[in-house]
Amino acid sequence: MNILISTSKEDTLNIAKNFAKNIKKNQLILFKGDIGTGKTTFIDGFVSYFNYNKPISSPTYSILNIYETIPNILHFDMYRISSIIDLETTGFFDYIDSNCIILVEWSENIIKFIKKDFITISIEKVDTNINYRKIIFS
């Protein structure tokens, strides 16, 4: 387990870019954290390492955003997923062994259905009055 502290949005973006340097295709990365903790900000920094320079947003309603990078990055939001049937309808299992990097927000909703090795990134607010975040890699 590795823990880093971010003191700003810029810190979070830079931590994500540095983390992305070691990620290869076919990697599954699960994100945990409350609303507003910075999961999407982290993913923005991560994706920018792969030269994707367009704005990103969490795919809360579309469930999946595909970022055309090398390798492609798939960004799932599982906030509204609560069953294996819901998960199957997202197409998630069709992508799981692709040559893509898969990033999953709200992974706690699907973790019991995952049979593949993964990295977990948990983001927690350290102080609600400032932008301090604890980023835990495991």
Image (tube, rainbow, N blue to C red):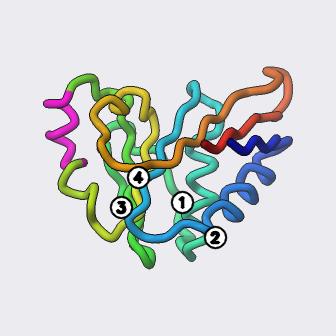
- Give the quarter of the figure containing the C terminus: top right
- Label 1: few (<14), some or many (≥20) within 10 Å? few
Tell me the SS state at disc 4: strand
User: Magenta stretch: residue 72 in it?
Assistant: no
| Distance from Cα at disc 1 to Cα at disc 3 | 12 Å
Q: CA distance from mark 1 to mark 4?
A: 13 Å
Mark 2–mark 1 contact, CB under 8 Å? no
Q: Residue at x 54, y 66 (%)?
A: 23
Label 3 sits on residue: 66
Q: Which residue is mark 2?
A: 21
Secondary element at tag 3: strand
Which badge, 1 or 4, comes first in the chain's sequence?
Answer: 1
Task: Examine the rendered structure and indicate whether residue 5 appears above or below residue 127.
Answer: below
Q: What is the number of the mark on residue 75? A: 4
Residue, disc 1:
55
Residue drawn 28% across and 28% down?
81
Q: Given contact means CB atoms under 8 Å apart, are the residues at marks 1 and 3 in contact?
A: no
**Kind of residue indicated by mark 3:** Ile
- Residue shown at 27%/34% (left/top)? 113
Task: Pinpoint residue 101: horizontal percent, then vertical percent.
Answer: 42, 62
